[in-house]
Image: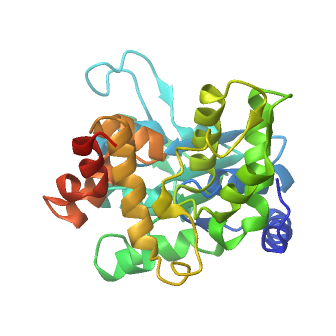
Amino acid sequence: MIVSPTMRRLMELVERVARTSAAVLITGETGSGKEIVARAIHHFSLRSSKSWVDVNCGALPDQLMESELFGHEKGAFSGADTVKPGLFELANHGTLFLDEVGELEPRMQVKLLRVLDGVPYYRVGGQKKIEVDTRVLAATNRNLEEAVSQGHFRGDLYHRLNQCQVRVPPLRERREDIVPLAEHFLKLHSEQAFFSEEAKELLRRSDWPGNAREVRNVVTTALIHSRGYEIGTGELGALHPARIKSPRAATGLRLDGLERDAIFEALHKTGGHHQEAARLLGISRRTLSRKLKLYGPNAESESKYAYETVSGG
């Protein structure tokens, strides 16, 4: 799956970083492979034989996230029928991966910072301090420097997580990897299936705003619609023409526009169901809501996908 010089250099960096004990902040667009990079860091580290634990920080509300990370004692709150170790405990001597760390609420940011600074903590409702030796890897698709400047993310936590930063480039910056990645997803479903040369060219020319996750979804859809082993351009109909790179459009596409297109297409595919659209995009419902607010109250109804629905496209 890794063909491009860009990704080869990235994996060399991953191996070097893995041998240290530094906290690592992994940045990149949604679906670009941040978790794969995090797992590679764990795999190459001295902690590889110990636990790997991961959590999506945008998936749970503040109160549940506290219990998830730090655990709780029996009777700490309604429904706490047993003692529950937190993820920090479960990852003791191993690695804890905090995905979408930019979605953490301010109160949780303070608690996380204290633990990262080595301060023992209490389980929710507990009276005994717990001390752990856990390496933390974090990932985000947000610009945390900008979030810090706007007061949405603590600067001290950002610097604590960002002892080393690894940026995962989007697929459009490493086009050599697109076809091998698509072929990898294809072989997971069918050993006999293959792409026609025209289909490969179409895959290469797409800008893939959803990155690897979108490739996987398009390949799966193409297989569902195929009547034989060959996957041609007809089966890749999920690739919207606006995403196909052309000489005229090559310098005119903006990341924010591509992201917006991907979000509205996901809403179009799911009939406007926000939870399903968020799942398709690989982001939290909270992140999707925040993006839609940025686009304005009428953006969804004014998108080209809304016009497609009206016209039957």
Position of residue 258 relative to residue 55, above or below, is: below
In the rendered image, is residue 153 in sight? yes
Of all residues shown, which one is farthest toward the left?
Answer: 297
* Residue at (68, 49) in percent of width and height: 95
Residue 281 vs residue 146, the one in the foreground: 281
- The x and y percentages for residue 177 are 77, 60
Residue 194 vs residue 174, the one in the foreground: 194
Residue 129 vs residue 88, the one in the foreground: 88
* Residue at (66, 29) in percent of width and height: 226
Identify the colour scheme used: rainbow
- The x and y percentages for residue 102 are 42, 62
Residue 156 vs residue 36, the one in the foreground: 36
Which quarter shows the C terminus?
top left
- The x and y percentages for residue 14 are 79, 65
- The x and y percentages for residue 242 are 46, 63
Position of residue 172 relative to residue 298, above or below, is: below
Position of residue 187 relative to residue 112, above or below, is: above
* Residue at (47, 57) in percent of width and height: 101
In the rendered image, is residue 128 in sight? no
Q: Is residue 81 left or right of residue 33?
A: left
The answer to which quarter of the image holds residue 106 is bottom left
Position of residue 180 relative to residue 221, above or below, is: below
Q: Is residue 187 left or right of residue 269?
A: right
**How many labels were placed on the picture?**
0
Q: Is residue 16 left or right of residue 265?
A: right
